[in-house]
Image (cartoon, rainbow, N blue to C red):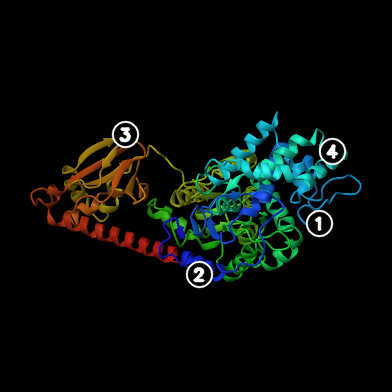
Amino acid sequence: MSGADGAAGSPIQAYLERMYERYADLLEGEVANYIPELAKADKRWFSICIATIDGHVYEVGDARQPFTIQSISKPFVYGMALEDNGEQEVLSKVGVEPTGDAFNSISLDPGSGRPLNPMINAGAIAVAGLVRGESAVEKLHRILQTFSLYVGRNVTIDHVVYQSEKSTGHRNRAIGHMLRNFDILGVDPDPILDLYFQQCSIAVTCHDLALMAATLANGGVNPRTGQRVAKPEYVENMLSVMATCGMYDYAGEWIYKVGMPAKSGVSGGILAVLPGQLGVSVFSPLLDAHGNSMRGLRVCADISKDFQLHLFNAPRISTSAIRAKYDATHLASRRLRGSEEARLLKEHGEQIRIYELQGELTFTTMEPVAREVLQHLDTTESILIDLKRVVFMNDAAQEVLTDLMRTASAQGVALVLAGAHEQDWLPKTIAVQGPALAPLTPPPFADNDLALEWCEERLLSGRGVERVPEATVALTAHDLCQGLTPDELARLLENLQARSFSAGDAIIHSGDCPDHIYFLSKGTVSVTVGLMNGRRKRFSTLSAGMVFGEMALVDRLPRSADVHADTDVECYVLSCEKFEDVACLDASVRAALLRNLLRHVSRMLRRANEEVSVLAQ
């Protein structure tokens, strides 16, 4: 009787089963009898489905029982007409005003003869005439193909129902010829009427309708196949007319009680959409006086109330889009600095402001971000916006962010984006802005740390620090050599071996035997570790005058990170054996090296503590 996509034990599945039991014995209403084949429906057929925008379907009852889609087809064909002709052309033929009339009413604008909306039969027939195709066969093929994309399987016509509709559709024929009289249909209406009868006779299931609803909720992308079926701007149009006109002369009460765009059909189906969240479908052929499923109305009202799905019951945004905000005095990049550079960054680091954003970015969530950034613009040199935790960004949020970039650039402030490797609109936005943003807006960084380093380099450059890539640092200036006398330095130098590496070379591999310590005298190297997701994380970047591989002197455990040369590199190498060999190094040299090593480790631990303190906000 029931089932779902691996939903055993799910509270949602259990809820639907309780809902099914609550209304299974409700036998009020009558099956549609004006189409003879529909009158043959079993009064006990009943199913409920909920489909999420990630493609999961919960279902109960006769969810795989085929029935004809009937008027539920109307918004989907309307979407096709919009894509084929454009909004203005469609609006010139069919309006969008609610009528408060029954589905088969003849509601035409008295002056133009234009049907008042595409959800009544008159509007739906006019819309069918707007579907692109050289022939009725080609038009039907396109409709079937599109509906198949919505449900993720090939759909077909129930020819028995089609013939039944065709033989009894006299009122629709009258509507078609009236539309021809007003030139809403510019051709013989009979082929269009035939197409409309076939469109209504497409066989679907309640499971199919849930996926169609979820596709609309997902902005026109089938959540299971990932295929785009409708353009987002036209999904908005479809949902609008469903909200105001989809339930005919019950539309006002529906939106008041249930609050979701919906469409019903006289075969007993109801499809409802909560944009951005889920789709709901109910199938039960017992209808009320409006032609809506009796069980469907009750079920949808209960689901909306129990799950608080009413469109106008928008929850307060309890989580700010700003996850954390701080400046570069609290968190530095993983590029290790000499004492002078470190001092400058501590002294002026408040002029680099970092904002970590999270969740869904819309106009309402981005507006406070923009306000916060603009408030500090006059005292800021660089702004780093980290998008790593952003799961969605709509067009309005993109526009706000682009405007921020433009405003910052005009004031000489760099706005740098990080963690945006999956936001494919960003490079396009920057490319469109062009020279107005460059060079203050570099390409987006995949990593927050690299973006922060860029901001630091900009700050240091503005304070007279010049990068000299070819500069060589003498052994006396190395971190681990501080405090050594000239004689001690000479004895140390006797035990060092000169090594050179080309840019890109791997110097140390994770898992290697800890056999050497490296004194970097020229160039830069980066230390990286592998992550569980297969990516690599930079642990630190070191420049001339620094050391790496130093933990080999402490724990003698296998290497825990990789080191590769960012540029051409020259260094001195001291083997662990020579460090331990009294004949090579006397106690005073070893003691000085260990003392400096402890000072170095202490700085690293303090830096790690600062990072944890900031990131734990």
Q: Find the residue positioned furthest to the left.
A: 583
Q: Which is nearer the N-term, disc 1 or disc 2?
A: 2
Horizontal side, residue 489 vs residue 162: left or right: left
Kind of residue sitting beneath label 3: Ser
Q: What residue type is labelled 2?
A: Arg
Query: Nearest the camera: 509 or 482?
Result: 509
Disc 4, SS: helix
Give how far across and how far down residue 532 sits, in percent: 34, 51
Residue located beneath label 2 in the image: 18
Q: Which of marks 4 and 3 is in front?
A: 4
Residue assigned mark 4: 180
Q: Distance between the residues labelled 1 and 2?
A: 36 Å
Foreground label between 3 and 2? 2
Q: Distance between the residues labelled 4 and 2?
A: 50 Å
Above or below residue 290? Residue 72 is above
Closer mark to the observer between disc 1 and disc 2: 2
User: Do the residues under discs 1 and 4 have CB atoms within 8 angstroms?
Assistant: no
Q: Which residue is drawn at the image coordinates 54% and 40% (left, top)?
A: 154
Q: Name the residue under label 3.
A: 502
**Which element is circle 1 on?**
loop
